[in-house]
Amino acid sequence: MGQPSPVAQDSPTGQDSPTEQDHAAAGHAEPAARSPYAEHTARLTRSLAHALVSENDDAELAETVRALATRLLDASEAPAAVTVDDPHPRSGFRRDITPITSAVNPLAPPMAIRREGDESVSDVALPLQYQGPPARVHGGIVALMLDQVLGNAAHSTGLPGAYTRELTITYDAATPLDRPVQVVGRIDRVEGRKRFMSGEVLVDGAPSARAHGLWISPR
Ligand SMILES: CCCCCCCCCCCC(=O)SCCNC(=O)CCNC(=O)[C@H](O)C(C)(C)COP(=O)(O)OP(=O)(O)OC[C@H]1O[C@@H](n2cnc3c(N)ncnc32)[C@H](O)[C@@H]1OP(=O)(O)O
């Protein structure tokens, strides 16, 4: 596995400035300012989620969190205006707020995606927050990872932006928590506006889940 390399494009179209379609796909307006606030908040929230699932109770910490939650609520009037330089290779959006690769979305692990040849690749180990059955990654999270990595691959060639039209997952085996897994996606063929995609989640090189799907550019 090579070193992560930044995704070349800032937008699904590969242009310097994001288009309206990029914004529609990303679901937000262009950020007005840059600040470390969002990144710190995301890290804090991930830490809180970890503390919650660890089931340790600490009254003093709980009070600190309560007070902080009150302050954060007060400060969250315009969250769309808060952003940071993403320290991770970006998914392709100028500002990534997806719940899987964004550095500033506390729902996201976050998962970094890089290009290797014709494929989009991510190495990730998912912690307990993403558990479904005991010791296994939730199947919906597996689908989310594959949707994102296949989506990244669908946009990696400078083709116009496209949306997931169909995504089929075959779960072959458990995807373990807290162990490195690799998610891979690629374009199998392009027919006009349609991109037929495939990919897999690999555990020690063997697929725990396989995906195929269709991405379509809007008219
Ligand atoms: C660098 C950035 C990285 C960025 C990386 C970012 C990764 C983000 C990953 C997140 C991905 C998402 O969550 S995306 C969000 C979730 N998905 C969505 O919201 C999509 C919702 N669906 C839609 O908006 C729409 O259905 C579209 C835009 C996808 C397509 O609409 P449309 O253009 O009207 O489509 P339509 O005419 O019906 O179909 C187009 C053609 O495809 C054919 N077609 C339709 N379905 C199928 C099918 N299952 N199998 C074969 N062919 C099919 C039709 O017959 C037609 O063929 P012909 O007549 O042309 O021959």
Image (cartoon, grey):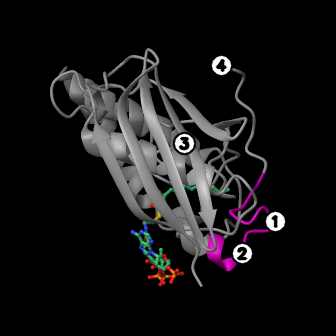
- Residue 188 horizontal/vertical position (percent): 58, 50
Alpha carbons under labels 4 and 1: distance apart: 28 Å
- Identify the element where label 4 is drawn: loop
Alpha carbons under labels 1 and 2: distance apart: 8 Å
Q: Residue sitting at 64 percent across and 39 percent down?
A: 119
Horizontal side of 45 relative to 94 (left or right) equals left
* CB within 8 Å, label 1 to label 2: yes
Q: As rendered, which of 101 and 211 lies closer to the eye?
A: 211
Mark closer to the observer (4, 1): 4
Q: Which residue is mark 4?
A: 1
Around disc 4, counting alpha carbons within 10 Å, would you say few (fewer than 14), some (14 to 19), or many (20 or more)?
A: few
Which three-letter amino acid code belongs to the residue tagged 2? Answer: Thr
Which three-letter amino acid code belongs to the residue tagged 3? Answer: Gly
Q: Earlier in the sequence, mark 4 or mark 3?
A: 4
- Identify the element where label 2 is drawn: loop
Q: Which residues are the magenta region?
A: 9-22
- When asked about the image quadrant of residue 177, the answer is top left
Q: As rendered, which of 10 and 40 lies closer to the eye?
A: 10
Horizontal side of 142 relative to 188 (left or right) equals left
Q: Judge whether residue 103 can be spotted in this image.
A: no
Which three-letter amino acid code belongs to the residue tagged 4? Answer: Met
Is residue 171 on the magenta stretch? Answer: no
Secondary structure character of the magenta stretch overall: loop
Give the vertical position of 185 relative to 34 (above or below). Answer: above
Q: Which residue is mark 1?
A: 15
